[in-house]
Amino acid sequence: MKSNEKLSPEKIQKILDDGKASMAIEGFEVTEKEEELVRQYLEGALSEEEVIKRIKGGL
């Protein structure tokens, strides 16, 4: 995501819903913690590096 691109709350929710649906088709469930981490990234509160660090660290 470009750092200067601001997503609306509706667009963020659509991205999250689409991602969860795709994961469900593959047999995976997205936890609340995982969803919140992605939401924070999409809102610009976390960098890509921070997200990767948290995922590698077990959230």
Image: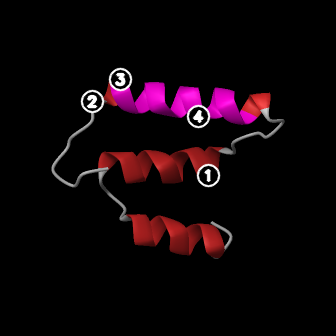
Q: Magenta stretch: give its range.
A: 11-23
Magenta stretch: includes residue 29: no
Mark in the foreground, 4 or 3: 4
Query: Which residue position holds label 1?
Result: 33
- CA gap, disc 2 to disc 3? 5 Å
Disc 4 or 3, which lies upstream in sequence?
Answer: 3
Residue 47 disc label: none
Residue at image mark 4: 19
Amino acid beneath label 3: Glu
- Depth check, mark 4 against mark 1: the one in front is 4
User: Contact, CB < 8 Å: mark 4 with mark 3?
Assistant: no
Element under disc 3: helix
Q: Dot 3 corresponds to which residue?
A: 10
> Label 2 amino acid?
Ser
Front tag of 1 and 2: 2
Crowd band around label 2 with a 10 angstrom C-alpha radius: few (<14), some (14–19), many (20+): few
Q: Amino acid at mark 1?
A: Lys
Between marks 3 and 1 in the image, the one whose residue lies nearer the viewer: 3
Task: Tell whether label 1 touches label 3 (CB within 8 Å).
Answer: no
Viewed as shown, does residue 18 lie left or right of 4? right
- The image quarter containing residue 48 is bottom left
Q: Position of residue 19 (x, y in %)?
A: 58, 34
Q: CA distance from mark 1 to mark 2?
A: 21 Å
Would you name the residue on which mark 2 appears? 8
Question: Circles 1 and 2: CB distance less than 8 Å?
Answer: no
Does residue 15 sit above or below 35 in this rendering? above
Front of the two marks 2 and 4: 4
* The residue positioned farthest toward the left in the image shown: 4
Which residue is painted at 56% across and 27% down in the image? 18
